[in-house]
Amino acid sequence: MILDGNDPTAIAAAARALRSGALVGLPTETVYGLAANAGSDTAVAQIFAAKGRPSDHPLIVHVADASGIAHFASEVPAFAQKLVDAFWPGPLTLILPRLPGVATGATGGQDSVGLRCPAHPVAHALLVACAAPADGSIPGDAPVWGVAAPSANRFGRVSPTTAQHVQDELGPDLLVVDGGPCQVGIESTIVDCTRGVPVLLRPGGITRAQITGACGVAPLSRDDLPALTPRASGTLEAHYAPTAKVRLMDAKALQTALDLLGAEAAHIAVYSRAALRTPSARLVLRRMPDDAAATAQQLFAALRGFDEQGVKLIWVETPPATARMGRRARPAAARSRGLKCRRQKPQPMRVACSGSIYMRLHCVVKLTATFLEKYTWQQIGCVVPLWSPHVRRPRCLRPAVQAPPNRPSRPSASSRSAMR
């Protein structure tokens, strides 16, 4: 059942459901979440069951404002407080030391807890209603200081960015509060604050540069400080995956593949900035925005739409090496540094992903971390080979080559001497 988030009675109904231990679909500025009372392990267990999610994979707890931290965390380092002051409410999750005996189920049994204050007005209204003092009308009613709310989708699938996505994924019986399409459209940035320095575990809506500017400390990556890294939401090997197979290809490779397949091309969706030509009427072509933030905002919705159209393959144009979306961004940047653009030997590469996953790419040109944070292609949660003209083409897309006719072999040196 979908309720209008702008209706106060819908907010009240959703708050009653959460306080009674039920699940609710919650809109945020990033993606829609599947919310439950973070203080009730029984309620939280329903999230793991509904999603098919491992119970030791921790959930992010959402609070109405910064005062909610005291109900879940035992300590807030100075740099973490600066991040709260700069980015809350907003798409930033902070992992902090957990108070003993609090939110054990939501944290997967860890001694840390991930906290976020969403910026969405509907989410804020619902969280405030949940934390309001009990009026005594319901026996056993008590304030809910925070809700555990991972993305409202089956585990490993593409995150929902509309209320209809949630209903399609989890069924009509779930109460979903409709807050409209998500404005950010990708997951929140996760920063670990439990080890004395900020450690970026999952890039997202808040960039590394913004974090550095706010707290005065450049965040480390999880590879810089691998010891005692807490488990965090959305950091497993495969995540945010559509049903169709996804391939990243540059514009030239996309056009070459379409030319080779010709009018027989079918069951393929192409999402690109470049204007492509194809004689096939059975392809799904979707124009990618030139703006990086706009593309990130619609990425999950685009992948879901392609799945709904029944395609088997999704070809996505490779993002540029910088946040600038212009087609000549990389050569221009290289020339400004006096560098030559050269081909590199394709090799397996592991990239720290913005959506909390790792993708192994067979890459020709290394994608920079700056762009990954901004553009978040790593949200595509599956093994993705980056195919370009410099990489051996798949056999099905190689043009047929006819063998040359037999020619007489060249005479040996001794035979040439005998002929003379």
Image (tube, grey):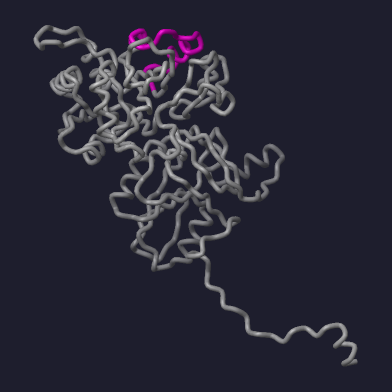
Picture coordinates of residue 234 (x, y %)? 41, 32
Q: Is residue 212 above or below residue 143?
A: below
| 358 with respect to 11 (left or right) | right
Q: Position of residue 187 (x, y in %)?
A: 39, 31
Height in image: 235 above or below 261? above
The answer to which quarter of the image holds residue 17 is top left
Give whichever of 123, 323 is nearer the camera. 123
| In magenta stretch: residue 84 | yes
Residue 53 visible in the current orientation: yes
User: Most prominent secondary structure in the magenta stretch?
Assistant: helix
Q: Which quadrant does the N terminus fall into?
A: top left
Residue at 30 percent across and 38 percent down: it is: 154
Magenta stretch in the rendered image: 66-90
State the image quarter where residue 12 is shown.
top left
On the image, the x and y values in percent for residue 317 come to 47, 49
Say left or right for 389 vs 134. Answer: right
Give the camera-side residue of 275 and 363: 363
Look at the picture and state if 409 lies above or below 361: below
- Residue 364 in picture, x, y percent from top left: 60, 49
Number of numbered tags placed on the structure image: 0
Task: Check the image and name the residue furthest to the left.
Answer: 137
The quadrant holding residue 335 is top right
Q: Which residue is drawn at 13% across and 7% down?
A: 135
Residue under the point 37% across and 31% down: 184
